Amino acid sequence: MAVQKSELQDFLTEKEKAEITALEKRIDHALREQYAGNQVWVTLSEYPSMRVKKELTRRYTDAGWTINFRSDQSDQRDCSSVVLE
C-alpha cells in the first residue's frame, strides 16, 4: 500500500530530530546570551534541510519569534545563519 501524503507532512527522521534538538539548543543559548530587544544572528555550520527549517520555523514562530534563514554562499549546503527578532 502506498504511503499517504498526509502521513509524511510532519514526518521527521531520527537524524532530523537530533539535528533540530542540537540547533534548538544552540539558538536558545544565543538568544539567552545576546538578545537585547533586537536581532540575534546565529551562525550554523551547514544549511539545514527544508524539513528541519520548517520545524524550527514552526517552533520559534509559536514561541513569538520571527525567524529567517540566510546563506552567504552560492551553495546553500555551506555555512549559513539564522536571524531571530
Image: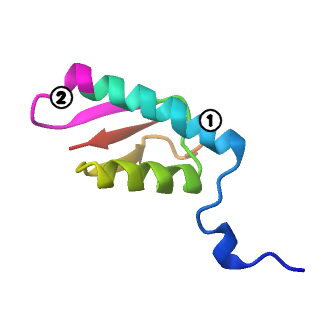
Task: For the N terminus, give its image quadrant.
Answer: bottom right
Which residue reaches farthest top?
A: 33
Occupied quadrant, residue 26: top left
Q: Label 2 is placed on what type of residue?
A: Tyr
x%, y% of residue 33?
Answer: 24, 19
Q: Is residue 52 left or right of residue 5?
A: left
As drawn, the label of residue 56 is none
Residue 11 visible, this orientation: yes
Front: mark 2 or 1:
1
Q: Which residue is mark 2?
A: 35
What stretch of residues is rendered in magenta? 32-43
Of 60 and 47, nearer the camera is: 60
> Is residue 20 on the magenta stretch?
no
Task: For the C terminus, give its image quadrant.
Answer: top left
- Residue at the image position 37 percent from the left and 40 percent from the top: 82
**Label 2 – label 1 distance at C-alpha:** 25 Å
Callout 1 crowding tier (Cα within 10 Å): few <14, some 14–19, many ≥20: few
Callout 2 crowding tier (Cα within 10 Å): few <14, some 14–19, many ≥20: some
Q: For numbered disc 1, what is the local secondary structure?
A: helix
Q: Label 1 is placed on what type of residue?
A: Ala
Q: Is residue 47 left or right of residue 81?
A: right
- Residue at the image position 27 percent from the left and 42 percent from the top: 84
As drawn, the label of residue 18 is 1
Q: Which sits earlier in the primary sequence, circle 2 or circle 1?
A: 1
x%, y% of residue 69?
Answer: 40, 47
- Residue at the image position 54 percent from the left and 40 percent from the top: 20
Q: For numbered disc 2, what is the local secondary structure?
A: loop
Q: Are marks 2 and 1 in contact (CB under 8 Å)?
A: no
Q: Is residue 2 left or right of residue 19?
A: right
